[in-house]
């Protein structure tokens, strides 16, 4: 069965969506939108969860892998010999929705509409989680091409937006004057770190997704880097919690890959 017109429309829509996302994000830096750099806005809402600026360089990798996905999923637009594209059907319009949310978030964020930006971030996260679930990472047999050009991009993207949602929520608490007053800064930050670690552990247990976990580790390292030279007791406790969180994720990966398999093999031998 050859690729359908509906699938071709989705392929073109996905291509245009990513082009629009990259263009708007580039304008946010080059103009910049509303005279703010994206990272500068985070500095307006100081908190203990926002990672170091270098951590955001992961966007380059995310957009690179998404570009490879777009190229991969575009098969069939020119050649009629390409068979039906199951990946396109699984994703449907969700990538288009996520792209609209990405663009809308940039606009809301740069205009300091923090509450609105959080709502939009939730839409982005939900759309990516829906894609991630539909792709069934770790639950179905896939080719190496699909692993590199489809699953990898959405593992990286979904993991980073998961962390970004927690960061956006933290900024919202600062904007509402809850952070550090109604909600203790230390307690809230450690709770966000614990939530990020819990999500990483769950994803590895259920999907064996190493790249998702590596993104969470990268974000936690960013939190450590930003506060490595600060000796305040409040910051030290957050740094310690972050280091413990990284260790938990790494230990879980090691256990699932080595010790659990060794224990299973030993049981069968006995």
Image (cartoon, helix red, strand yellow):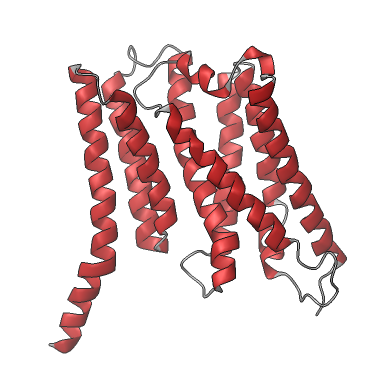
Residue at image location 61% in from the left, 45% down from the top? 63
Q: Residue furthest bottom?
A: 269
The one nearer the camera, 231 or 252, is: 231
Tally the marks: 0
Q: Quadrant of residue 181?
A: top left
Q: Quadrant of residue 211?
A: bottom left
Residue at image location 52% in from the left, 17% down from the top? 40
Residue at image location 34% in from the left, 31% down from the top? 223
Q: Position of residue 32 (x, y in %)?
A: 66, 19
Image side of residue 228 versus residue 207, left or right: left
What quarter of the picture does the N terminus occupy? Answer: bottom right
Residue at image location 78% in from the left, 75% down from the top? 82
The one nearer the camera, 21 or 98, is: 21
Q: Position of residue 131 (x, y in %)?
A: 60, 55
Q: Is residue 29 above or below residue 21?
A: above
Q: Quadrant of residue 87?
A: bottom right
Image side of residue 112 versus residue 55, left or right: right
Q: Position of residue 43 (x, y in %)?
A: 46, 16
Q: Is residue 108 above or below residue 73?
A: above
Q: Position of residue 126 (x, y in %)?
A: 57, 45
Image side of residue 93 versus residue 177, left or right: right
Image side of residue 222 versus residue 63, left or right: left
What quarter of the picture does the C terminus occupy? Answer: bottom left
Q: Is residue 206 above or below residue 61?
A: below
């Amino acid at each position: 069965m050859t690729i359908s017109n509906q699938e071709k429309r989705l392929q073109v829509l996905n291509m245009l969506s990513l082009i629009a996302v990259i263009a708007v994000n580039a304008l946010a830096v080059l103009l910049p939108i509303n005279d703010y750099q994206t990272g500068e806005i985070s500095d307006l809402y100081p908190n203990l969860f926002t990672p170091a600026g270098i951590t955001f360089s992961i966007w380059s990798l995310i957009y690179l892998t998404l570009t490879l996905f777009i190229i991969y999923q575009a098969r069939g637009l020119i050649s009629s010999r390409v068979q039906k594209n199951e990946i396109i059907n699984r994703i449907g319009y969700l990538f288009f929705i996520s792209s609209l949310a990405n663009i809308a978030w940039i606009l809301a964020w740069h205009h300091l509409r923090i509450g609105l930006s959080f709502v939009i971030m939730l839409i982005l996260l939900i759309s990516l989680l829906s894609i991630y679930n539909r792709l069934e990472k770790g639950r179905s047999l896939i080719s190496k091409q699909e692993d590199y050009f489809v699953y990898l991009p959405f593992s990286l993207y979904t993991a980073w937006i998961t962390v970004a949602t927690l960061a956006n929520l933290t900024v919202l608490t600062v904007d509402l004057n809850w952070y550090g007053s109604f909600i203790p800064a230390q307690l809230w930050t450690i709770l966000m770190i614990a939530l990020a670690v819990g999500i990483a552990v769950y994803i590895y247990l259920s999907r064996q997704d190493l790249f998702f976990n590596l993104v969470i580790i990268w974000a936690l390292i960013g939190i450590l880097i930003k506060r490595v030279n600060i000796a305040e007791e409040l910051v030290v406790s957050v740094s310690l919690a972050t280091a413990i969180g990284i260790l938990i994720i790494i230990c879980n990966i090691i256990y699932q890959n080595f010790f659990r398999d060794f224990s299973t093999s030993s049981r069968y031998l006995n």
